Image (cartoon, rainbow, N blue to C red):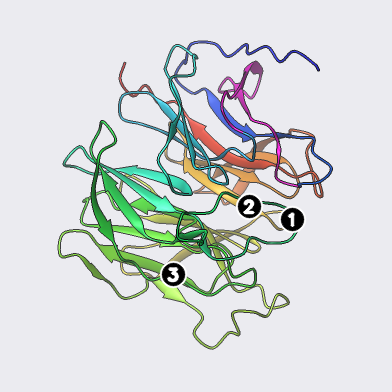
Amino acid sequence: MMLLTSTMKPFEIGDIFLGCTYVNNPDDDHMGDGRIMQFDKYWRPKGTLYTEGTRYFIVGCKMGPDGTLWAFDCHDHITVRVGPDGKQMGSWDLGRSFGSINWHDDGNLLFGEYFIGTEIWKGTSAKMLDSGILGDGNIYKYTPDLKPIEVYDVETAVEPTMFKGVTHSTLHPSGDFITYTTETARRLMRYDLRNNQQMDDLDGYPDADPLDRADKRWFIAPSYLADGRLMCTVADGLRIYAEDGKTIKDIPLPGYGWAQVTPDVDQRYALAANVWTGVAARIDLDKGVITESIDVGFTAPNRSLAGIAVYTGQGA
């Protein structure tokens, strides 16, 4: 067995982190050596962390307010944390398939549950709950020390594989509500956290057959900018919304599969990752163009680029 040595360095402002599991199990197309790749702000390689305690894709990478990098192996219910020193902290099994995280203004954590239903898609596997299901697809509030507080019984959307719940989520800057998606479904959903109720969708395609794979009118990964504009990757690019849900701009991106997006240090730019092509890119939101990109070398069918985050100096 090859010895995997982690070389991740202490975080510096502008560092980019890519969740890119080394997929190497011929019997499971999501299974392999968990890996987070580190680059500087110019996309020069700095180091690699091989995650301890994981077996599947590393998804949903996100920086916490204290500079801790969070990520998830949602198939095995593992939450990964990496300190600003580049060292992995203790992993947690929180008992559910969490795949995204947000920090509320009361200091508590909000986790999105990735899976629903009773059967995972062919080609992979996942841990089941004691009740015999993959998950309920809800949003869960936890204290900072990871004690459960509340469950938000949110709606999810039908999509072709029938096992996805809250796959991506992003908290509005006000903290009033959370916007989320069921990846490759027809709804861009919102939930009111103050009043504990579902809100009207920000956008959607109610006329579309949710099981029709040929019709690629769907939503993938939402992420708020500090000024309240919402970015969301769609089948053919990146869409930017005003607060009222009106489209400000559609930015075409090459290839299908832009499954993660996050604001850059300078929020004129965004960083996005394409799980199918293995390309990560910096996008100029004003000009609507890719300014820089790299190819991590993992493309379909061995795709695994399922997380992207940037260190902006949190906690420093």
Which of the two marks, 3 or 1, is nearer to us in this view?
3
Please say whether residue 191 is visible from this viewpoint: yes
Span shown in magenta: 29-54
Mark 3: which secondary structure? loop
Please, what is the three-letter code of the amino acid marked with disc 1?
Gly
The tag on residue 152 is none
Position above or below: 302 against 84 = below
Alpha carbon of mark 3 to alpha carbon of mark 1: how far?
26 Å
Q: Is residue 53 magenta?
A: yes
Q: What amino acid type should be assigned to the residue bearing mark 2? A: Trp
Give the percent coordinates (x, y) of residue 291. 63, 38
Q: Nearer the viewer, residue 25 or 68?
A: 25
Which numbered mark, 3 or 2, is in the foreground of this view? 3
Residue 156, label in figure: 3
Looking at the image, tell me whether mark 3 or mark 2 is earlier in sequence order: 3
266 in relation to 82, above or below? below
Q: Position of residue 96 (x, y in %)?
A: 44, 48
Q: Position of residue 202 (x, y in %)?
A: 37, 70
Measuring from the top left, give residue 53's x and y in whole percent. 56, 27
Figure check: 88 above or below 279: above
Q: Residues within 10 Å of mark 3 (few under 14, many from 20)?
A: many
Q: Amino acid at mark 3?
A: Thr
Label at residue 255: 1
Q: Residue at x 59, y 79 (%)?
A: 210
Secondary structure beneath disc 2? strand
10 Å crowding of disc 2: few (<14), some (14-19), many (20+):
many
The disc placed on residue 258 is: 2
Q: Quadrant of the N terminus?
A: top right
Say if mark 1 contacts mark 2, CB within 8 Å. Answer: yes
Judge left or right: residue 88 versus residue 303: left
133 is within the stretch colored magenta: no
Q: Residue at x 34, y 24 (%)?
A: 314
